[in-house]
Image (cartoon, rainbow, N blue to C red):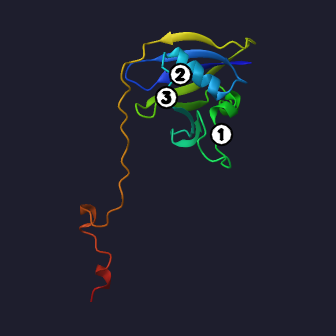
Amino acid sequence: MNYIITIHLEHKEDVIRNIEIPSDETLEALHSAIIKSLNLDGNEMASFYITNEEFELLQEIPLYNFEKKDTNMLSMNKIKISSVLTKKGSKILYIYDFIKMWRFLVTFSKESNNESKVIKHLEKIGEMPNDAPEIKFEEIKEFDPFSEAFEDSDEFKDYEG
């Protein structure tokens, strides 16, 4: 069985690609298909990320595993697409080039009865911009007991004599 996979660049302009790929192919084959469909140079590192509903990163699947041999981290060439995108609507994140941070949402859009093992580039919407979009990271604020929010609060005032 083949999957129709939609790749959507996180950008203000729509940049979307639809790819048909056998579900038993590896994530490395999907990575190569994404590179080809978007005309990226293919010389940068990349990873897929399994996320939760809020898109918090749960598991990284790197192009290459640089960890020691005894780790449980698997690389793209060890994982089948169907084991990650298990049902229609399943989504993963794909990040290409960790300096520029091109981020893509990869969605299992539908199944195809086509039995061909050839990866097909079906639809192309928009052109890749020259520059990656700026990603703003949320700052996690640390608890500050001396901040202005606690000026009127005195936890010991009930104990004063």
Residue designated by label 3: 44
Q: Nearer the viewer, residue 4 or 72?
A: 72
Q: Is mark 3 on a helix, strand or loop?
A: loop
Q: Earlier in the sequence, mark 3 or mark 2?
A: 2
**Quarter of the image containing the C terminus?**
bottom left
SS of the residue under disc 1: loop
Q: Which of marks 3 and 1 is nearer the N terminus?
A: 3
Question: Which amino acid, by three-letter code, is at mark 3?
Answer: Glu
- Left or right: 57 with respect to 26? left
Compute the Cα span from label 3 to label 1: 19 Å
Q: Residue at x 65, y 30 (%)?
A: 85
What residue is pinned by disc 1? 74
Q: Position of residue 155 (x, y in %)?
A: 32, 75
Q: How crowded is mark 1: few (under 14 residues within 10 Å), some or many (20 or more)?
A: some
**22, above or below 65, in the image:** above
Report which quarter residue 86 is drawn in. Answer: top right
Residue 49 lies, in percent from the top left, at: 56, 36
